[in-house]
Amino acid sequence: MKRLLFAVSILVVLGSCQVNIIEPRYDARDKVTGYYAMEEFSATFNDYTYYTVQVTKYGNTGNEIYLDNFYGADIQVMAYVNGEKITIPYQVVDDYEIEGTGTMQGLNVSLNYSVRDLYNHTQTNFCETRGNRK
């Protein structure tokens, strides 16, 4: 009888326990955020430019990121991350018309985009840019 009473009391105690499993939040954008040393090649002007870009997350969830100092022009461009792919949708920022795509590979980012200066009415600049995380 004592064994039965002991077994029942153990079951009651175990049955009344609440187990909370806390899973860490994974944000796919974390693998791309940070500072990058960029090397930009202009296919239009056959010229190289070097500058630093900071990639930050937009909001607590989602897939939006910001590229600060994009094009070395101190502008902030919005982009989307989906797996290893980066998409820079068409947008006009501070009189620059911008659109492009890119990929992430380890600590490196590759971007291909076009930029058109609407203020100075220059021709469209087609750029291939490689960035190494600092």
Image: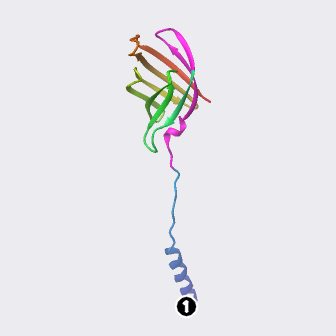
> Where in the figure is residue 43, as x and y percent of width and height?
48, 11
Q: Which residues are magenta?
A: 25-50
> Where in the figure is residue 39, as x and y percent of width and height?
56, 19
Frontmost residue, 81 versus 2: 81
Q: Which residue is mark 1?
A: 1
Q: Residue placed farthest to the right in the image?
A: 134
> Where in the figure is residue 16, as x and y percent of width and height?
49, 75
Give the residue at x 57% y 89%.
Answer: 2
* Above or below 10: residue 121: above
Q: Quadrant of residue 51?
A: top right
What colour-coding does the image apply?
rainbow
Give the residue at x 50% y 79%.
Answer: 12
Give the residue at x 53% y 10%.
Answer: 47
Q: Is residue 36 magenta?
A: yes
Binning the other alpha carbons within 10 Å of mark 1 as few (below 14), some (14 to 19) or many (20 upward) gives few
Q: Amino acid at mark 1?
A: Met
> Where in the figure is residue 97, as x and y percent of width and height?
39, 20
Q: Is residue 52 magenta?
A: no
Give the residue at x 49% y 40%.
Answer: 28
Frontmost residue, 104 versus 41: 41
Q: Quadrant of residue 35?
A: top right
